[in-house]
Amino acid sequence: MGVITYKLTQVFVVSNPITITESAQSHFAKLLAQQPEGTNIRVFVVNPGTQNAECGVSYCPPEAVESNDTEFKYEALSAYVDELSLPFLEDAEIDFVTDKMGSQLTLKAPNAKMRKVSDDAPLMERVEYAIQTQVNPQLAGHGGHVSLMEITDEGIAIVQFGGGCNGCSMVDVTLKEGIEKQLLQEFSGELTAVRDMTEHDRGEHSYY
C-alpha cells in the first residue's frame, strides 16, 4: 500500500483591515467566475514602506497560496495577503467606481509607504507617519516630498524638501500655510513649529 503525503498549508484568518466594497466584490466575482474553480484574489504592496510603494491586485489560484499568507474572507470571495505586505495594508480600501469616464477599480492604501503607528508611539514616529500619509500625498502632485530630519527639545520639527519642492518659489507658503498649520493642529501641545533646513537651488525639477 502506497504512502499518501499531504502538503500542509497554514493560512491565518483574522479580522479584515482591507475594505472591499460591495461593488468591488461584485466586480471580482464576475472575473473570478471565468477563472479555474477555487481562484480568489491576492492584494499586495510592491516596495512596501518606501516612497515607491505601489499596491496591486492579482488572481490567486489555490496552488499560489503560501504558508505565511493571511486570508481575509468576504461574502463573495477571499483575499490573500503575503506576510511582508500585511502591515502596510491596514485601512486599505478597494472600490469599483462608475462615472462619466466609465468604470474602474480603485485601490487606496494610506499606509503603504509607512506602516500605521500606535497613538502612544514616540513623537518622532507619529509625526513621520503623518508626513508620509497626509503631507507627502498632497505634495506628490507637484513631484515633491518632505522628510522629517529631527524634532528638537523645544518641539521644533526640522524638515527637508525634495523633488519638485526643492527650489520652488512657493515652498515658504507650502511650509507655513500648509504643512506647519496641519502638523501643529494635529500635534497640539507637542510641536511648537516646523522649520525647513533645505538649501533651495532652483532648477528644471522645481515646480514653480
Image (cartoon, rainbow, N blue to C red):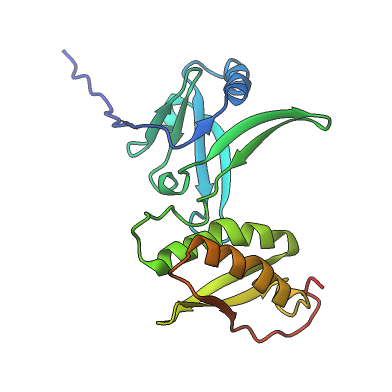
Instruction: Give left or right: position of 106 versus 131.
Output: right
The answer to whether residue 100 is above or below residue 134 is above
Residue located 47% across and 72% down the image: 191
Q: Quadrant of the C terminus?
A: bottom right
In which quarter of the view is residue 199 placed? Answer: bottom right
Q: Is residue 141 found left or right of 158 in the rendered image?
A: right
The vertical placement of 158 against 90, above or below, is: below
The residue at the far top in this view is 1
Extreme residue in the front direction = 189
Disc tally is 0
Where residue 168 sits: x, y (%)?
76, 76
Q: Along the line of sight, which residue is nearer the eye, 158 or 8?
A: 158
Q: Quadrant of residue 201?
A: bottom right
Q: Is residue 181 visible?
A: yes
| Spot occupied by residue 71 in the image (x, y as percentages of width and height) | 39, 30
Outermost left residue: 1
The residue located at (33%, 58%) in the rendering is 120
Q: Quadrant location of the N terminus? A: top left
Relative to 193, is 45 above or below?
above
Residue 78: image location, x then y, percent: 45, 25
Task: Please say whether residue 52 is visible from this viewpoint.
Answer: no
User: In which quadrant of the rendered view does residue 59 lie?
Assistant: top right
- Front residue of 33/157: it is 157
Task: Give the residue drawn at x 59%, y 84%.
Answer: 197
Measured as percent of width and height from the top left, residue 107 is found at 61, 39
